[in-house]
Image: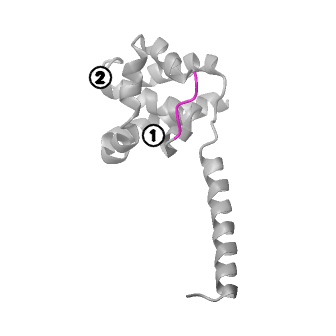
Amino acid sequence: MTDLYSFLKEVQATHKERLAIDQKEEELIAPILYDLSRMQEVYECFTTMINFYSQEPLTSIDNRRAFILIVLRLYCPRVFAGYKLSRGIRDAIADIHKCEPSLVSHNFRNLAFYYLKYVEFRAKVDNLYMAIINMISD
């Protein structure tokens, strides 16, 4: 059994650590973009990069996954921490890709795992993401 002094110090220290972690998470999950009308601009940059650097068709599964991952990072990074997808994002992605919203949902569930596991996919996404970040920051 711990004494009261140790207990109080540990509770205070734990609370302080939790606040720091909560603040860090808030910083990490803050969106870069909020305006969904810019998603078409993001897609145009994505399309240009794919057409220039890749032999795969734009409609390939890997390209769809890459686009969804990038859009989620830009608009709703909190999904990677287990939060729900923000309203309107799934439908906007589906409209751009001309697919059913459920297809977007099925794709984004395992994207973090896929990105972390497959080095070639990760390199591709990183290059596309940096090009898009450079485009939107100009």
First of labels 2, 1 by sequence position: 2
> Which of the 4 quarters of the picture holds residue 118?
top left
Around disc 1, counting alpha carbons within 10 Å, would you say few (fewer than 14), some (14 to 19), or many (20 or more)? Answer: some
From this view, report whether residue 87 is shown above or below residue 133: above
- Chain part drawn in magenta: 83-87
Image coordinates for residue 65, horizontal then vertical, percent: 38, 29
- Using the image as rendered, state which of residue 65 and residue 84 is in the foreground: 84
Q: Mark 1 highlights which residue? A: 126
Query: Spatial distance from mark 2 to mark 1, Cα to Cα?
Result: 17 Å
Tell me which residue sits at (59%, 87%) in the image.
2
> Which of the 4 quarters of the picture holds residue 61?
top left
Image side of residue 27 versus residue 108, left or right:
right
Residue 42 image label: none
Tell me which residue sits at (41%, 32%) in the image.
108
- Would you say residue 84 sits in the magenta stretch? yes
Image coordinates for residue 22, horizontal then vertical, percent: 64, 55
Quadrant occupied by the N terminus:
bottom right
Secondary structure of the residue carrying tag 2 is: loop
Q: Mark 2 highlights which residue? A: 56
Tell me which residue sits at (58%, 31%) in the image.
75
Image side of residue 42 versus residue 23, left or right:
left
Amino acid type at mark 1: Asp
Does residue 65 appear in this view? no
Amino acid type at mark 2: Glu
- Using the image as rendered, state which of residue 129 and residue 99 is in the foreground: 99
Instruction: Say how many tags the image has.
Output: 2
Find the residue positioned furthest to the front: 1
